[in-house]
Image (cartoon, rainbow, N blue to C red):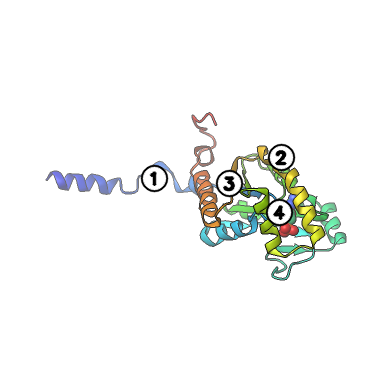
Amino acid sequence: MAAHALNKASNESAFPERRIFPDEAVKKVAFPVVVSGPSGVGKTCLCQGVLADCGDVVYSVSATTRAPREEEVNGRDYHFVDRERFRAMIQADELLEWAEVHGDLYGTPRYSVLPFLEQGKIVIMDLDVQGGLSMRKAFPDGVFVFIVAPSFEVLEERLRKRRSESEEALKVRLRNAREEMKFRKYYDYLIVNDLLGRTLETLKSIIVAEKCCMTRLFPAEGSGSTR
Ligand code: 5GP
């Protein structure tokens, strides 16, 4: 008799969140996740890993004037455009932000972000620190994650192994890495990318935690958090 009552009670509360969190509120949780950090730190792999594992996350495809690398596909990795087209995009206010990075122009098209946020998706983007700051102003409720290598030596080794840049371009990226590190204080989270698998799990955990954030679920109610 007692066991039966217990089963009944636990069945009733099997899905308590259905009563506590209305589906409508949960569906409204959409936010950008900005991933920044020095070149070669592993941002692209991390974003790809998140996309492979999280069905509600989409990647914001940037526009760039940089030449495509061997393995890159136009429209999937970047929208590869010439400077004239990039300037036209700026003029037409098609970009949410843009910046010159390592001598090339990079920008986030509105169409790569806004329609997906409206659909309730999480939009992950790989931006330099200038882009990170611009997005912070445009989306104060975004999630900003800074990735670092365990050391500068490891970063250089990873960049060299990649073999995607000339020696000169590589030196520019290494020089810029030291400057970019100064911007980490503007980010919400810092992850040391020592083991890719572990870093990916940490990044996914941050996204999952942010999806459960009380002020995102119920913005009108706020929360007792002092964060
Ligand atoms: P890569 O040439 O290695 O693909 O990217 C160079 C740098 O440009 C990276 O730091 C990357 O985060 C940044 N980047 C890529 N897309 C954008 C963008 O749309 N806006 C900004 N501001 N930076 C970007």
Taking depth in this image into account, of 172 and 20 the one nearest to the observer is 172
Secondary structure under badge 1?
helix
Packing grade of label 2 (10 A; few <14, some 14-19, many >=20) is: few
Q: Is residue 145 left or right of residue 129?
A: left
Amino acid at the residue labelled 3: Ile
Q: Is residue 141 above or below residue 50?
A: above
Pointer 1 or 3: first along the chain: 1
Residue beneath disc 2: 182
Indicate left or right for 227 with 17 as reference: right
- Report crowding for label 3: few under 14, some 14 to 19, many 20 or more residues within 10 A (C-alpha): some
- Give the quarter of the image for residue 75: bottom right
| Residue 55 percent across, percent down from the top left | 52, 59
Query: Which residue is located at x 76 percent, y 67 percent?
Result: 68
Q: Which residue is mark 3?
A: 191
Q: Earlier in the sequence, mark 1 or mark 2?
A: 1
- Circle nearer the viewer, 1 or 4: 4
Disc 4 crowd, CA 10 A, few/some/many (<14, 14-19, 20+): many
> Which residue type does callout 1 highlight?
Glu
| Ligand 1 within 8 Å, label 2 CB | no
Mark found first going from the N terminus, 1 or 4: 1
Check disc 4 and report the residue beneath it: 39
| Nearest to the observer: residue 201 or residue 221 | 201
| Dot placed on the residue nearer the N-terminal end, 4 or 2 | 4
Tag 4's secondary structure? loop
Disc 1 to disc 4, how far (Cα)? 42 Å
- Residue 17 - label: 1
Q: Is residue 96 at least partly visible in the picture?
A: no
Report, in whole angstroms, how far the alpha carbon at label 1 lies from the one at label 2.
42 Å
